[in-house]
Amino acid sequence: MEFDRIKFYVENAKVSRDWFVGQLGFQSTAGYANSHTHTEAVSSGNVCFILSSPLTPASPAARWLKFHPPGIADVGFRVKNIELAVARAAAEGAKILEPIHEDLNPAGYFKRARIAGWGDLSHTLVERRIGENSALQASPKLPLFTRIDHVVLNVESGDLSSAVSWYQKILGFRPQQNFDIQTEKSALRSQVMVHAEGGVQFPINEPASANSQIQEFLSANRGPGIQHMALQTTDIVGVVADLRSCGLPFLPVPPTYYSELLQQRQNYLPADWQAIAACQVLADWQEDTPAAMLLQIFTQPIFAEPTFFFEIIERRVSLVDGKQVQAGGFGAGNFRALFEAIEREQMKRGSLIDD
């Protein structure tokens, strides 16, 4: 299984298209409309987003935006056998929103279906038979991003185990890492889910305190939903510099983060350490494979409310016993640093009181 197209419902598809092109370095690949919905497609490398906005109240986008702020409405997954995937989902009780049907267009020939996900989220399942979606093909412009690394779902307090079980039964995910993050101000619990076939990672979070940043998201989103998505790159320092030059704002990291990290990890410093710190990129690594660094940075929320944001991630490779080992999973240090960075933004918004 791999990530396929991701659908956003937004207030104005053209405005959102221009934001992705101007702020995130994507390319506009298609634009079309029917009687009720205007849609734009943007891409970067193998990453494709579908941006839909309502033209009339009959639009699915209008119905969704009536209950939620702009954000991700559908996370697409590419599967090897759609008949088996849909049959499994149906047998386990999933609601089939759109049965399997076949499409033939300039992008190629493929099968797709759509099932209801957690909350108001849906999942389009796609089996591509020949060719590739035109929005996913290589383009003359060198893309900033190689793939979607992971997508994060926030659920209501007490729903984490149920959501984990649902994604295990319906789509074949399995639990991997889990985190319990707590500071003096707030807390969360997280379970990373990975698919048995392919590289899809799908962490699920729940609030573990009344003023948790996860609860702030749930309140602003008016229910569970996708909190953030990580876009993978092979040059995070260069990409972040490019994005900052376009005006994309990132969560700030205090200088103490780097001084404390240096004290803890004096055994290894990469050649570009100063550039990493100057870019305010979070860094984590295992002691036995220090070159396989996990580098991450997070944008400010991209919409008006404190809901969805992007993560930029680079997973570096280390040579161990003649074999290449890539940084995997999610570093506990980086996870906590992100949590604390969002806490600082909560305090700026007045949604978290610092006693």
Image (cartoon, helix red, strand yellow):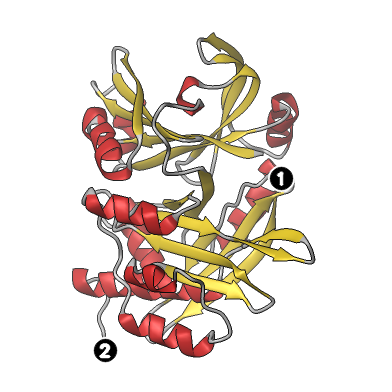
Quadrant in the picture for residue 103: top right
Q: Secondary structure at mark 1?
A: loop
Alpha carbon distance from label 1 to label 2: 43 Å
> Image quadrant for the N terminus?
top right
Disc 2 crowd, CA 10 A, few/some/many (<14, 14-19, 20+): few
Residue at left offset 39%, top offset 81%: 257
What amino acid is labelled 2 in the image? Asp
Q: Secondary structure at mark 2?
A: loop
Q: Is residue 144 left or right of residue 332?
A: left
**Along the polypeptide, which appears first: circle 1 or circle 2?**
1
> Residue 196, how many percent across, how many down?
74, 48
What amino acid is labelled 1 in the image? Gly
> Residue 64, how many percent across, how many down?
34, 35
Q: Is residue 240 left or right of residue 55?
A: right
Which residue occupies the foreground of this view, 262 or 270?
270
Q: Can residue 100 be seen here?
A: no
Residue at mark 2 = 355
Q: Can residue 77 be seen here?
A: yes
Residue at left offset 62%, top offset 62%: 327
From this view, report whether residue 213 is shown above or below residue 73: below
Which residue occupies the foreground of this view, 153 or 286?
286
Quadrant in the picture for residue 326: bottom right
Residue at left offset 47%, top offset 35%: 45
Residue at left offset 79%, top offset 66%: 321
From this view, report whether residue 261 is shown above or below residue 149: below
Disc 1 crowd, CA 10 A, few/some/many (<14, 14-19, 20+): some
Residue lying at the far right of the rendered structure: 321
Q: Is residue 349 left or right of residue 193?
A: left
Q: Is residue 268 left or right of residue 42?
A: right
Residue at mark 1 = 172
Which residue occupies the foreground of this view, 72 or 94?
72
> Image quadrant for the C terminus?
bottom left
